[in-house]
Image (cartoon, helix red, strand yellow):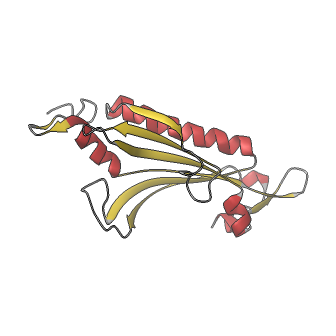
Amino acid sequence: MFTQWIHSYRDLPLMINQWANVTRWEMRTKPFVRTLEFLWQEGHTAHATLEEAEKEALQMIDVYTKFAYEQAAIPVIAGRKSKVETFAGADKTYTIEAMMGDRKALQAGTSHNLGQNFSRAFGTQFTDENGLRQHVWQTSWAISTRFVGGIIMTHGDDAGLMLPPRIAPIQ
């Protein structure tokens, strides 16, 4: 749809946020963390420059980091994935990793600078201020119901669940 919506630099930045149910094949499921179907909040953006796309990708991982700390009371480490772990088709992948009670890390949210990889594949171009055709620079970012699992694993134990006060002011 970006290819149909974007024609001029005046159409940029284009920013789409959506909530969608996702279904995928999972051999071994774990409630909230690895399920066949999950709810996913995701964003997709298109920008005129690499710098604008990088700023957006970093801003969104910062939004997820602040939400984890301030609302869910989950300490996370924000960082960049290695080249091997980078999302397929992305130039850079940023993530927040949360340490769970079982000493395993949970990837709790991601943000990707997709560069021009998808815009070249799909022919998503715009006419810049000088009348030249350019490919857009894209990002995507997402958080899912896996984060709910992170809240439960962080704030629950065999005795039950105590939710953070900003999520549940009345226990």
Residue 37 can be seen, yes or no? yes
Q: Is residue 16 visible?
A: no
- Asked if residue 127 lies left or right of residue 163, the reply is right
Q: Residue 40 falls in which quadrant of the image?
A: bottom left
User: Residue 79's x, y, as percent?
Assistant: 52, 36
Determine whether 11 is above or below 28 in the image: above
Give how far across and how far down residue 156 sits, in percent: 18, 38
Q: Which is more toward the observer, 150 or 55?
A: 150
Q: At 56% across and 45% down in the image, what residue appears?
A: 82
Name the quarter where the C terminus is drawn.
top left
Q: Who is closer to the viewer here, 11 or 74?
A: 74
In the displayed orientation, state which residue is furthest to the left: 159
Point 56% across, 51% down: residue:
86
In depth, the one of 14 and 59 nearer the eye is: 59
**Residue 131 at what x, y percent from top left?**
90, 56
Front residue of this view, candidates 76 and 28: 28
Drawn side of residue 34 relative to residue 139, left or right: left
At 89% from the left edge and 57% from the top edge, which residue is drawn? 132
**Residue 24 as seen in the image, left or right of residue 46:** left
- Report which quarter residue 32 is drawn in: bottom left
